[in-house]
Amino acid sequence: MNGAGHLDLTGKTALVTGAARGLGKAIALRLAENGARVFVAGRDAAALRDVGGGTQPLVFNLDDEAACSGALEQVGGVDILVNNAGMRDRRALADLPREAFSAMLETNLTAPFDLARRVAPHMIERGWGRIVNVTSIAGQIARGDAAYTASKGGLDALTRALAAELGPHGITVNAVAPGYFATETNAQMVADEEIAAHLQRRTSLGRWGQPEEIAGAVAFLASDDASYITGQVLAIDGGYLAHF
């Protein structure tokens, strides 16, 4: 057993989507450090190869059913699924066409459903499995951004429904809900002094989160230490939701 104690994931195969950078990359590296065989999925082949840490790149488009089937055949059975891939379109309601809303639902909600459906038979056969969805505090509170908020609220609900259905088979399904994290995607916001001031006032910790600060929670939920936790959405937000 490695130094992670019960968080040892040796012998487990993990698939992390949207893992080329940011939260997904940090999560993948932590799972690999804890002994899992980790496949990092995305569309940027070069970035996936650069993740390192012993991870294996898996290049495919989540919206392509045939590509999903082919990718999962390469993996050969997933014990830990982390649905991290997501997209966001911050346009106002009046400026967001129906097709843009549909595209966001496809990536943020339909793809996690589809991957869970595909990996569940292997988990059921083994009598053990972990699914961790990366949602958002936007699934619980809103400041506009209707399409993104709706997709993440749906992912929260999907987490609970899958937990209820798959629990009898020894499979736990949980979610982590990030608050404000300093990722490459948010670089422009991170540099904004007004946002920094807002976080200082609005969160208990008064700062942006770092990608590595979400990885430990996901590794915990993927481990045997979390064997009696299912159907939960854990906010990792520096105390944002605790304030009003």
Image: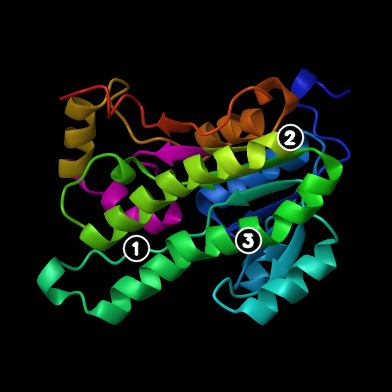
Q: Nearer the viewer, mark 2 or mark 3?
A: 2
Residue 230 location (% of width, % of height): 57, 31
Q: Nearer the viewer, mark 3 or mark 1?
A: 3
Cα distance between the residues tagged 1 and 2: 33 Å
In this rendering, does residue 39 appear at all? Answer: no
Specify the color scheme.
rainbow
What SS does tag 3 mark?
helix
Q: Which residue is mark 1?
A: 88
Residue 115 location (% of width, % of height): 63, 61
Looking at numbered disc 2 in the image, what kind of residue is underneath it?
Gly
| Figure check: 155 above or below 241 | below
Looking at numbered disc 3 in the image, what kind of residue is underneath it?
Leu
Residue at 71% x, 52% y is 120
Looking at numbered disc 1 in the image, what kind of residue is underneath it?
Arg
User: How many neighbours does mark 1 have within 10 angstroms: few (below 14), some (14-19), or many (20 or more)?
Assistant: some
Cα distance between the residues tagged 2 and 3: 18 Å
Residue at 20% x, 74% y is 96
Residue nearest the viewer, comparing 87 with 151: 151
For residue 170, which numbered disc appears in the image? 2
| Figure check: 121 above or below 220 | below
Please count the marks in the image.
Answer: 3
In this rendering, does residue 204 appear at all? Answer: yes
Q: Look at the image and tell me in which quarter the N terminus lies.
A: top right
User: Which circle's residue, 1 or 2, is located before the other in the chain?
Assistant: 1
Which residues, given as a range, are shown in magenta? 175-193
